[in-house]
Image (spheres, rainbow, N blue to C red):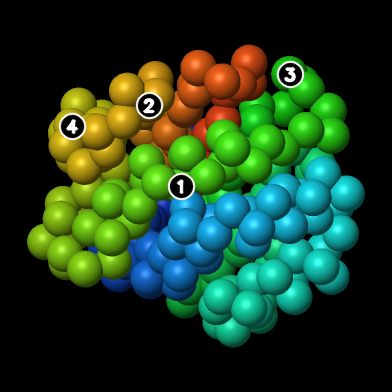
Amino acid sequence: MVKHRGRRPVHAPTGAALQRIARQMLPFYKAIACNRKYAAAWSRTVVSADLNAMIKLLRKVSPVLGKHGLGTNAIGYFISFAINKSSYSNGVTIPPGTVRFKFETAAHCALTRAILPLYRRLACQRSFVDRLARAIRCHNKPLAIALIRSTIRSSALKAVYIDHTGFGLSFKFPFSKHVYQNLLFLEFEK
């Protein structure tokens, strides 16, 4: 349990919540990693901020994801998950303020190929996901970072950030001048 200054304690994330998110995101991340045409169409919808087209694309690979909340800022996207009384967000973005109306298909594909082993492990290995969730909740950043880095072997992974509700992964690919981030975090808890 983590306490916010002036607010009530946060009890998230749980292993069950992280596992549910990973299981639901896995078909989408696989489609981006393995299908260049699908990934290019996705990138176009992100840059144009066309939420209706994004929902249609999500439903092609995962009907469940197409029912979740979705957002874009033309440099990334986030999918929302309502779990119990909490709302989590997962997605990929370029850090705000560094670029406008840019989302490279090649970088997105490379990032998803790099994170697939982590999301597979989160989806399938309950002991791993419980251990990671506990490390995040307890502010054990070294353990959480070690768990994530033990699964993602890409040299493009430049930083792992842990906060009290989730994680952020920063990737820098040699063919792109932009940093891309995969984020999973608690938006709010009722």
Q: Amino acid at mark 2?
A: Leu
Residue 99 in picture, x, y percent from top left = 78, 22
Q: Amino acid at mark 3?
A: Thr
**In the rendered view, would you say 176 is above or below 107?**
above
The residue that disc 1 covers is 112
Q: Earlier in the sequence, mark 3 or mark 4?
A: 3
Residue 156 in picture, x, y percent from top left = 39, 24
Of badges 3 and 2, nearer the viewer stands 2
Number of residues whose C-alpha sits closer than 10 Å to that of mark 4, classed few (under 14), some (14–19) or many (20 or more):
few
Secondary element under disc 3, as helix, strand or loop, is loop
Q: Earlier in the sequence, mark 1 or mark 3?
A: 3
Q: Earlier in the sequence, mark 1 or mark 2?
A: 1
* Residue at x-position 37% and y-position 26%: 157
- Determine whether label 1 and label 4 are within 8 Å by CB: no
Secondary element under disc 2, as helix, strand or loop, is strand
In screen coordinates, is 127 left or right of 24? left
The residue that disc 3 covers is 98
Whether residue 159 can be seen here: no
Secondary element under disc 4, as helix, strand or loop, is helix
The quadrant of the rendering that contains the C terminus is: bottom right
Q: Earlier in the sequence, mark 4 or mark 2?
A: 4
Q: Amino acid at mark 1?
A: Thr
Give the label on residue 157, or none.
2
The residue that disc 4 covers is 146
* Residue at x-position 40% and y-position 46%: 113
Depth order, front residue of 8/165: 165
Of badges 1 and 4, nearer the viewer stands 1
Depth order, front residue of 107/79: 107
- Determine whether label 1 and label 2 are within 8 Å by CB: no
Residue 34 in picture, x, y percent from top left = 47, 57
